[in-house]
Image (cartoon, grey):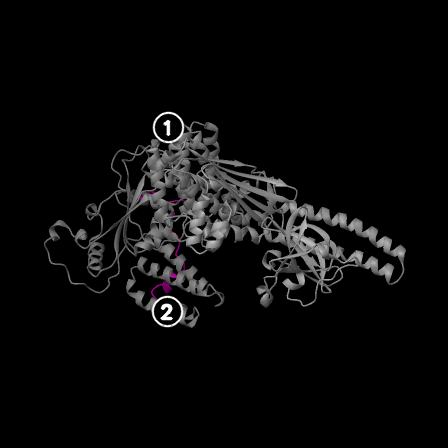
Amino acid sequence: MNPLLEQFLSESRESLQGIGEKLLQLENEPESAQLMTELFRLVHTLKGNSGLFDFPELTRVLHAGEDLMDAVREGRIPYSLQMADQLLDAMDFVGMLCDEIETQGSYDAAYAGDSVRLAEILRQLVGVPAPEEAAGRQADPSPSPARTAASELPLGEIPEKVRRDARRAALEGADLFFLSYAPVPDCFFQGDDPFHQARQTPGILWGGVAARKPWPKLSELDAYSCELTFRLLCRAPLEELKEHYRYVAEQLEIVPVSARSLSLPEEAGAEPEAPAGPTPVAVPLRGEVCHAVAALVAAQREILSLPDEGAWLAGRLRAAAASLAGCLRAVGAADSLAALQVAARGALDAGSAAPLLLWLDGSALAAAAPLPAPPAGAAGGPAPEECREAEPKAASLAPGAAPGEAEVKFGRRAEDAFAGAKSLKVDQAKIDRLMNLIGEMVVAKNALPYLAGRAEELYGVRELSREIKAQYAVINRIAEEMQDSIMQVRMMPVSFVFQRFPRLVRDTSNKLGKEVNLVLEGEETEADKNIIESLGDPLMHIVRNSLDHGIEAPALRVAAGKPAAGTLTIRASQESDRVYIEIRDDGKGIDPELVKRKAYQKGVIDEDQLERITDQEAVNLVFAAGFSTAETISDLSGRGVGMDVVRTAIERVNGSVRLESEKGKGTRIRISLPLSMAVTNVMIVESSDQIFGVPMDAVVETVRVPRCDIKTIKKSMAAVLRGRIVPLRSLNGLLGLSAPQKANGEDELAVLVVSLGGAPVGILVDDFHETVDIILKPMAGVLATLSAYSGSALLGDGSVLMVLNMKEMV
């Protein structure tokens, strides 16, 4: 993918996000001229940028949307909810095409039909069904030749031989179509060449050009306005014709042609002729066509003489064979097509152009290689005599004509796309690489205190030890500043996730028949990109649950003394090194008794737990796997995977989630997340002569408890700390080590107090050590199955530190 296309896709994402936001804001402020102007500008910019690439389906929809918003902006039509729905559908279509372009490099041409349909729907909202009006002119009230039914085929203009051959082909089951191509008047200013487009139509049997209205006087003729309709009789597959005209699909009508429609009135009762062998179609040729055929033959000979190498050889051979077949038809030598097909097949099988070159040297086209002198007036246009010959109503079109000038793309110039850039866009992989290097530097600097200790204790060089420690302080400060700076580059606002919720709430509440006001707060709060991206799915589940289970229908809310419209608030904030996301609704809340019954029925809790479980503990059962209070399964909820997925996803990024609910008042969910996962701060503890790391996020405090204060309750150890009973677990026992925990000289055991699910748990260890910053590397291979460890890290002295996963161990 080239850099310009990458930039277009990146800018398209931002534009589509802005378009969606402005459309939703307009629903609350439909009279806002400023919002409509900003919306129009976004779509206009996106449409202009798309014109730089070969994406006609995308540009067509954006053009129609631009026309619609321009009509609203100028006050010609009022803004409505129906209009918002259609515009949102159109932007979804554009976003889908952008997704396919990003993943596949292009998209399927079959989307042309959807593109035309969406564009027509948008134009109908403006009251301009015809493409000509969408292009900016008044439609001609007189019937347009572009809308020609099959019964109106110009049989009198089609040569008798062509008509009879086409009729025989139709009787044999060939695909015949009559095309009416009516370019918009200002097509030349859009970079189109309608004459070249028509001449290159696949499978032309006959072609003609007709004026849409009587020609004005020469002095009044606008040479830059196309008022022609191209009428073509073709023998080609329908999909191939649609592909050829995909850029101007709305300017084309394709009508299937039957054998009966090719019969003159006096032939209507006659018996159909017996199918005959293929007869070359004689198309009137003029001097410039013969000259074009000669030029094409010479060009194909040059192409076939290129070296037989490269992945594109097969495509080159097929293209050359197709061009030569067109030349044969143009010179009336269609009987040689079979031999050409045999030669082409042989060239493809052999992977060499030699069979095609051999056929060309002995074919009827060999004499066309020397270029004849161009006819008089060819360089500067047709001679006066030829102009007089072209005056009849239908001018003939011949297939196989030489290609014209390269198509000119329209829209904003490429250099304008870079004008006024206020930020530098950097590939995410480069940022991640830089972050990894910073992390390695953090680990490397931890080796300096170790070296200082060796210099003093092993070699007795105290001065050198002090100098190393001084340099460590300097390097530590620089490393921390670099780490903070690169972290700022990786930081993203939570609005990146929040931006999807206005549309989600709007569509879901409409589907459920509810009225919901969405309030977003703290959208500027920032966190690491990986943390922000991990929020998407969990928040989506929570919001859907709030809309489906939490907020009641308007009638129920009014009966309960509440406003008919519910309120869903999503708030983000930062405290110290944590980011907090709060989702609150004023719905019916969670009934703990209902949760208890459902949990008991599903086997989540037993009968004893049912009796002694508290209301808050019952509410937290919604996070249990497979639990749901929904009576029916829908596309929104009821499958028992939502809240369990939420908790799992949040804990995967070292976060936590807490739920509070009051029956009849509403529900509040608070999510706590780290600012970053790039560098982890851990405390080193010792147990059984080994060292382990415990993430500081889980550590509450470290204490030493006299052995005599440790009691056994129901075969489990516990101690009273800070006035509350704290259960104790031996780290050696959790790891399956047989050695008992060591006490210090005063018979005190080291206790590391950690918080698990909001409850404190004491971990007995042998001793505490310092805290260090590490780069946590996940376990790989067979070791990845060891749930007791969250990863490993390399210390400054070269040793490996195993980091414990306290949630899995305890």
Task: Identify which amino acid the numbered label 1 is placed on.
Answer: Arg
* Residue 380 part of the magenta-drawn span: yes
Residue at the left extreme?
Answer: 269
**Secondary structure mostly taken by the magenta-highlighted segment of the chain:** loop
Label 1, label 2: how many angstroms apart (C-alpha)? Answer: 60 Å
- For disc 2, the marked residue is 345
Residue range of the region highlighted in magenta in the rendering: 358-385
Q: For numbered disc 1, what is the local secondary structure?
A: loop
Looking at this view, is 524 or 17 the one in front?
Answer: 524
The total number of labels drawn is: 2
Q: For numbered disc 2, what is the local secondary structure?
A: helix
Measured along the vertical axis of the image, is residue 658 above or below residue 794? above
Task: Identify which amino acid the numbered label 2 is placed on.
Answer: Arg
Instruction: Sort mark 2 into few (<14), some (14-19) or many (20+) by Cα contacts within 10 Å.
Output: some
Residue at the bottom extreme?
Answer: 350
Quadrant of the image for the C terminus? bottom right
Q: Looking at the picture, how far across and down is residue 745, in whole percent?
A: 80, 59
Left or right: where 721 falls relative to 517 = right
Q: Which mark is residue 76?
A: 1
Q: Looking at the picture, how far across and down is residue 95, in whole percent?
A: 45, 46
Looking at this view, is 759 or 436 the one in front?
Answer: 759
Is tag 1's residue or tag 2's residue first in the polypeptide sequence?
1
